[in-house]
Amino acid sequence: MVERRKPIPVEEAIERVMKFAKKGEVEKMPLAKAYGRHLGEAVLATHDVPPFNKSPYDGFAIRAQDSREANLQNPVEFHVVEEIGAGTVAKRDLGPFEAIRIMTGAQMPVGGDAVVMLELTKEFEKNGEKYISIKRSFQEGDNISFQGEDAAKGTTLVEKGTKITPGVTALLATFGYAEVAVAKKPNVGVYSTGTELLDVSQKLEPGKIRNSNGPMICAQIERSGGVPLYFGSLVDDFDQCYQAVKEALEKVDVLITTGGVSVGDYDYLPAIYEKLGAEVLFNKVAMRPGSVTTVAQLDGKLLFGLSGNPSACYVGFELFVHPILKTFLGSEKPHKEIVHATLMADFPKPNPFTRFVRTRITQKEGRFVVEPSGLDKSNVVSSLAFANGLMKLPGGTRGFASGDQVDVILLEDYHGVY
Ligand SMILES: Nc1nc2c(c(=O)[nH]1)N[C@H]1C(S)=C(S)[C@@H](COP(=O)(O)OP(=O)(O)OC[C@H]3O[C@@H](n4cnc5c(N)ncnc54)[C@H](O)[C@@H]3O)O[C@H]1N2
Ligand code: MOO
Ligand SMILES: [Mg+2]
């Protein structure tokens, strides 16, 4: 008799998997190679930024108090005693009614507490000496970039586990992180299973299809920050599959298989888990697609049995594998970001299971709007190409209509949540 499986809610399935989430180790990487990696330690402001008070304009540093009487009728004159560009420091302190010509980025001279932009000054010479006059007063602190206003020494600026973006790279450079501590990438093994599978380079034959899940999963692993180790495709033969899975497990942090997890005659993964002595965390999830997604663990190592159906395989990866890889990379918020959006299509048919619809999410008049990116079936591949989100439609007795508010998991995000 065919095995009857008891579906568990998606949230519970995620919880069961996350009990086996592990943090990976940290390694050092030259800054130039660190882009796209995940921080192995928080970025700390090791000094103030700016490290000194500096001028944000090309102009003249003055003592604000000397400008107090300046107005349109009464220009006040300053003796220009020195000129400095960014990277040089004034040799003298500013005295009363003295100005130092200063360029953007240069350190403020001692005594100077305001900067007058070049455009607001009149320059002239008297007795071979340079002078300026100004026709308005300035307050202490006018036009100064203050020491520490950008980042104060000791502040944690970026959390451990954050993906290194170009902006994070700028911060790392600012604070002299020539070598960056990054999380080691998890090695994720992948096996496709199915006698019907042809390699990408092979010609179609009767009854056969090209293996799209293998390359797709490898790309998903890379998107989530892991290293895919593609072991190839297995025909539906128990002994071969068992041996291959057993050996692959030794070489990886996480192992993914696709196909062979349902109740068919050649679906061998359930029996393979049993023979390995692995604990099956669940083998049926109350979701569509991917209800057959099965996860097992052996000595704490996770084996993901993703569905063979392309859309189910894709969704299973994003919900269950992605947060495991992100945790390995040090993220405290390993799940993908969820936003609210307005549904732009009808889903009148109620479904008892939670549905994850491959969707295109865009903005219209300042709000997120979402619509399916193609045919909404577990066995389709075409809806995946332009999907940038997974719309989550809770299971229940009602359908959904255009205009309803729905949650959408963003597929291409940088920041995790919860
Ligand atoms: N009697 C039942 N039949 C099925 C059930 C069920 O509950 N009772 N569940 C259905 C659901 S839901 C799904 S999803 C599939 C899952 O099947 P498997 O995970 O066992 O996968 P396979 O049988 O190996 O293949 C399913 C389908 O996907 C194609 N496939 C497989 N691998 C690849 C690949 N690497 N690239 C592209 N396409 C692939 C395969 O040719 C099949 O068409 O089971 C239902 N059946
Ligand atoms: O697992 Mo199946 O994807 O529900 O269609
Ligand atoms: Mg099957």
Image: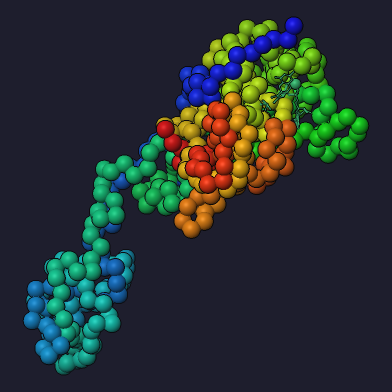
Residue occupying the point 28% across, 82% down = 119
* Viewer-side residue, 168 vs 86: 168
For ligand 1, give the image quadrant.
Answer: top right
Q: Is residue 112 visible?
A: no
Count up the numbered dots.
0
What percent of the width, then of the height, locates residue 331? Answer: 44, 33
Q: Is residue 360 visible?
A: yes
Residue occupying the point 58% across, 10% down = 279
What percent of the width, then of the height, locates residue 63? Answer: 13, 72
Q: Is 227 on the left-hand or right-hand side of 197?
A: left
Q: Where 266 falls versus 383 (above or below)? A: above
What percent of the width, then of the height, locates residue 24? Answer: 49, 27
What percent of the width, then of the height, locates residue 258? Answer: 70, 25
Q: Where 282 falls versus 395 (above or below)? A: above
Residue occupying the point 67% across, 11% down = 4
Q: Where 95 falls versus 151 (above or below)? A: below
Instruction: Quarter of the image for the N terminus: give it.
Output: top right
